[in-house]
Amino acid sequence: MATLPLIPEEPRGPKLVGIAKLAAEGEQIREGYNVEYFTLSARSILTKCSAGDRMPFTWTINPYRGCEFACKYCYARYTHEFMEMRDGYSFEQKIFVKQHTANLLRRELKRVKPHEDIAIGTATDPYQPAERRYGMTRAILEEFSRHRGFSIGLVSKSQLVTRDIDVLQEVSKHNSVAIHCTVTTTDVELARKLEPRAPRPDLRLQALRQLREAGINAGVICAPVLPGITDSRANLDAVVKAAADHGAAYIYCNPLFLKPCSMKVFMPFLEQEFPHLVPAYKKRYEKEAYVSAAYRKQLVALLDNLCHKHGMPERRERQKIREYLSAETERKAEQMRLF
């Protein structure tokens, strides 16, 4: 198989180093639907989260770089900038498949302390179309099934997660596992605009039901909530109701934060689909990527109200569940030390 450099080095241009050099050396392994897949010789699969206390996890795992789902609001587009791809759209068109993920994970898990959570899929969907062919996510889960005492969360918009119910059940026997199914709206037409190549919301909810029926801890993450687009009471009420109807163990939400790298894609999309919201978004996000504390507080209060209405755990109940799962993880970690 011939090797196709993705970023040919110009004779007089800057020399590529680090991840950009590895990306340039990647081997093209598939092309279709204007999406190209390349190998990436990863040096590590486990990454320490740099956001500190702002995130409920310490470590991240992303089996792929880039994501074919092409969500207009995606904050992770910046990860392609490390590979000298700064147009914003390469993130959804050039997908890098990390190599030897299970072997890397086996070597690196010794860095994780018992109380530290691991999140899979923070910068790319681990069950995007590439996973059906290359199976990097399943290989990672199979590796976790050989260990005890870890706290693992996985975020996805894809029903492909149900393919791995068997291995998720094995992982859950000796580890704390939570599958977060992302549902930003139940409106199929709106979802198609916001998340053009992601599976429909109803398919994600059906996957959630299957996970729950299989005894796997799974719930809904409604994130991001987009001001003026998906933050209405009616939209959030429909999402909470759907979560409850499909057996979700919990639901939580986070408002949109808009990084400069995301602006390149999101603002043109907004101008085309929601032009009346452009001035408000420019004002809200021109100096800060995050929404105001007042908006966040209002959103949390609305979600709690809707959770109460539909019999879902409210904020305090979710906190108790998290504390219980944390204690359970500690117990399993103690068991791990006996083997």
Image: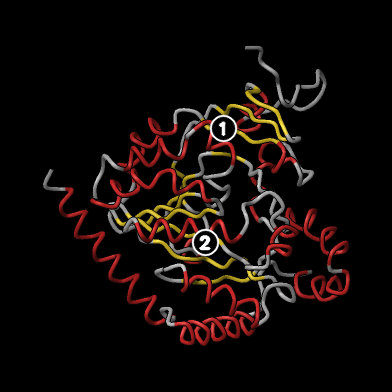
Q: How far across and down, in percent of the image, does residue 311 sit?
A: 42, 82
Name the one closer to the observer, 323 or 238.
Answer: 238
- Which numbered dot is residue 3? none
Name the one closer to the observer, 322 or 70.
Answer: 70
Q: Residue furthest left?
A: 338
Look at 21% across and 53% down and name the residue there.
Answer: 333
Give the vertical position of 68 relative to 7 (above or below). below
Q: Is residue 180 left or right of residue 79?
A: left
User: The residue tagged with tag 2: helix, strand or loop?
Assistant: helix
Q: Is residue 179 left or right of residue 239?
A: left
**Residues at marks 2 and 1, CA–CA distance in whole angstroms:** 27 Å
Look at 40% across and 56% down and name the residue there.
Answer: 211
Give the vertical position of 304 relative to 230 (above or below). below
Look at 43% across and 71% down and name the residue there.
Answer: 250
Q: How far across and down, in percent of the image, does residue 301 sit?
A: 54, 86
Q: How far across and down, in percent of the image, does residue 195 sit?
A: 69, 56
Q: Amino acid at mark 1?
A: Val
Number of numbered markers? 2
The quadrant of the image that shows the C terminus is: top left
Foreground tag (2 vs 1): 2
- Which numbered dot is residue 97? 1
The residue indicated by pointer 2 is 205
Q: Amino acid at mark 2?
A: Leu
Look at 57% across and 84% down and name the residue there.
Answer: 297
Residues under numbered marks 2 and 1 in contact, where contact means CB atoms less than 8 Å apart: no
Q: Is residue 43 left or right of residue 83?
A: left
User: The residue tagged with tag 1: helix, strand or loop?
Assistant: strand
Q: How far across and down, in percent of the image, does residue 194 sit?
A: 72, 60
Count residues near mark 1 (Cα–Cα under 10 Å), then give few for <14, some for 14-19, many for 20+: many
Give the colour scheme shown.
secondary structure
